[in-house]
């Protein structure tokens, strides 16, 4: 087979990537640079940069927001990984039923989160389908929507992102890996032993990558927490958005400051994920 | 080799597997059940398990709220983003696939590949908050800024899809066509585009969905005046909004997405088989 083999050294390959890279970098910097400048006071006053907006932030609102953001992201990621990976194992070990489940997951991935949030609301609110099914009387159904434990928010993310995890794991697990699993079975290893000794180590890179993407996504997402969460504490994106919408320019700058804190949280998550991936990757090499 | 413990016996394993698959199927379909029911309910009082009065009142109300025009706006936005992000992603994918094939990928490839995935790493709500100021200052129309943001968000996906396609692309057919006297345009039109068509369809589908399903960028950059289907859904679901309208809007959002998914996966399979 002849591959597409342009003159690599001459840089035509680079020219091909450049337009896309210019758009992504231009848009990202076009958003982040004004955000940094305005959060440092360029929008409110002329003069030297000031950290006034950061210092003016309500520390308890910021810390509570950070705690909720991290908690919701961690719980959603954990649930998505467990369900998605379990699903991938079951799909790989079965035939037609597995294909149906994989098709359902593929159908869930393109559902916008706002639609998912509206659907989970109709399912879990105190007058939702779940409350009807259990026959809860007035005030008896636990506050899953807008309640203290963010259950509806976490379930929405877990619902959609577990489908994403399943597809990533299925795509990353080669046929050779499945043969290794079968070899383990032939040698007498039970399902749990095979899962611990063969399945999990082989899927580890895919789990780390998809888990990192899910965590960073959830930490920086707005609409699900806005629709299904409580009014206080607000996750960082919701807090940033509310402050940004204020008519007072100084409060607006605080909104941008919170947005930048969120960016830092996501960047940290990605850095941790990259470090974990470097650790997980060698496990694919034969010992 | 028959020392397999009894508890791992095939009957029990198969049963566990079946129960697991049924639970998973429920997990991914259950949240959509109330949506489907509310979409055909005119009245559904608590605690009835099924609607009291069936009907399509929600659809009529959604239409009166401007759902038709909003859907057209969403579709136009999706098409615009797909039209820009697909060719850009195809070019980038070709460049990166070429670089991938060299013994050691050149430095620029690593840098540019990172640059292309930047929008995945930076939450887009933060980007759009800053971008509103820039767009105002530079007098860029909000719709242009919105399309630019959504193209940037879509580019990592279109690039990944097309990079994989280019990695498996066989240039032998192009050589054969050229030997037979085809010029560059003919080779592009008759050989390259048909061969890449399934990949391009998947990439365009993903780019379309990024814009079709967007909420936050449209909300911020459109300032609440660019009323897409998602804006309408958000406003209805957050307000006192009636459930039948929410359900009608949700189903309207899902229908083209699932339809396109079916078409594209069929195309994709046809492409993989050929």
Image: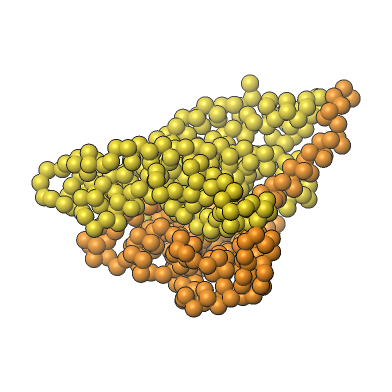
Chain colours: A yellow, B orange
Question: Is residue B87 depicted above or below B102 in this figure?
Answer: below
Above or below A270: residue B36: below
* Rendered residue at 87%/37% (across/down): B11
Horizontal side of A258 relative to B112 (left or right) equals left
* Residue located 20% across and 40% down the image: A51
Identify which residue, B44 or B153, lies in the foreground.
B44
Q: How many marks?
A: 0
Which quadrant would residue B262 be assigned to in this image? bottom right
Q: Where is residue B107 in the image (x, y as percent from the top left)?
A: 39, 39
Instruction: From the viewer's side, name the closer residue of B181 and B64.
Output: B64
Vertical comparison of B241 with B1: above or below: below
- Name the residue at 33% across, 40% down: A62
Residue B52 locus on image (x, y percent): 67, 69
Asked if one can make out residue A82 in the rendered structure from this viewpoint, the answer is yes
Q: Which picture quadrant has residue A198? A: top right
The residue at the point 79 percent across, 38 percent down is B16
Q: Nearer the viewer, residue A140 or A226?
A: A140
Vertical arrangement, residue A118 with respect to residue A213, above or below: below
Q: Pinpoint residue A218: horizontal percent, then vertical percent.
A: 47, 45
Which residue is outermost to the left?
A47
**Location of the C terminus of chain A (image quadrant):** top right
Side (left or right) of A221 relative to A145: left
Q: Position of residue B13 (x, y in %)?
A: 81, 36
Q: Which residue lies furthest to the right in this view?
A: B2
Q: Nearer the viewer, residue B1 or A34?
A: A34
- Residue A45 lies left or right of residue A65; in this view the side is left
Q: Can residue A102 be seen in this view?
A: no
């Amino acid at each position: 087979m002849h591959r597409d083999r342009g003159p690599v050294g001459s840089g035509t390959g680079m020219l091909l990537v450049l337009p896309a890279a210019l758009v992504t970098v231009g848009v990202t910097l076009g958003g982040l640079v004004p955000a940094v400048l305005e959060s440092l006071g360029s929008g409110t006053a002329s003069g030297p940069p000031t950290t006034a907006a950061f210092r003016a932030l309500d520390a308890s609102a910021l810390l509570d927001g950070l705690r909720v953001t991290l908690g919701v992201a961690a719980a959603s990621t954990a649930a998505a990984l467990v369900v998605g990976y379990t699903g991938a194992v079951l799909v790989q070990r079965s035939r037609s039923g597995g294909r149906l489940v994989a098709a359902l997951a593929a159908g869930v991935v393109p559902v916008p989160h706002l639609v998912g949030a509206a659907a989970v609301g109709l399912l879990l609110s105190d007058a939702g389908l779940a409350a009807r099914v259990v026959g809860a009387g007035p005030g008896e159904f636990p506050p899953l929507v807008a309640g203290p434990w963010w259950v509806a928010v976490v379930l929405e993310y877990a619902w959609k992102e577990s489908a994403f995890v399943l597809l990533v794991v299925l795509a990353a697990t080669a046929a050779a890996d499945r043969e290794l699993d079968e070899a383990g079975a032939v040698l007498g290893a039970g399902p749990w032993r095979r899962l611990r000794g063969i399945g999990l180590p082989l899927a580890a890179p895919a789990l780390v990558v998809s888990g990192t993407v899910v965590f960073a996504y959830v930490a920086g997402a707005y609409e699900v927490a806005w629709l299904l969460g409580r009014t206080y504490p607000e996750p960082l994106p919701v807090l940033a958005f509310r402050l940004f919408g204020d008519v007072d320019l100084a409060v607006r700058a605080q909104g941008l400051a919170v947005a930048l804190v969120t960016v830092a949280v996501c960047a940290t998550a990605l850095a941790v994920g990259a470090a974990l991936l470097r650790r997980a990757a060698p496990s694919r090499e034969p010992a | 080799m028959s020392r397999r413990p009894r508890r791992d016996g095939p009957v029990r394993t198969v049963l566990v597997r079946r129960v697991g698959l049924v639970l998973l199927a429920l997990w991914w379909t259950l949240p959509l059940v109330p949506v489907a029911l509310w979409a055909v309910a005119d009245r559904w009082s608590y605690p009835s398990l099924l609607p009291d009065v069936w009907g399509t009142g929600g659809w009529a109300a959604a239409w009166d709220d401007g759902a038709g025009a909003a859907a057209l706006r969403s579709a136009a936005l999706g098409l615009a983003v797909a039209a820009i992000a697909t060719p850009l992603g195809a070019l980038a994918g070709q460049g990166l696939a070429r670089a991938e094939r060299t013994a050691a990928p050149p430095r620029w490839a690593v840098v540019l590949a990172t640059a292309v995935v930047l929008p995945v790493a930076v939450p887009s709500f933060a980007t759009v908050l800053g971008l509103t100021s820039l767009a105002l200052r530079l007098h860029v129309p909000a719709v242009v800024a919105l399309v630019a943001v959504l193209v940037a968000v879509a580019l990592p996906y279109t690039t990944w899809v097309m990079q994989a396609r280019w990695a498996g692309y066989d240039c032998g057919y192009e050589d054969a066509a050229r030997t037979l006297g085809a010029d560059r345009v003919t080779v592009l039109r008759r050989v390259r585009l048909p061969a890449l068509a399934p990949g391009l369809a998947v990439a365009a589908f993903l780019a379309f969905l990024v814009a079709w399903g967007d909420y936050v960028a449209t909300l911020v950059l459109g300032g609440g005046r660019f009323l897409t289907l998602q804006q309408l859904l958000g406003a209805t679901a957050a307000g006192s909004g009636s459930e039948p309208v929410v359900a009608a809007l949700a189903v309207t959002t899902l229908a083209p997405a699932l339809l396109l998914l079916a078409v594209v996966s069929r195309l994709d399979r046809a492409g993989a088989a050929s």
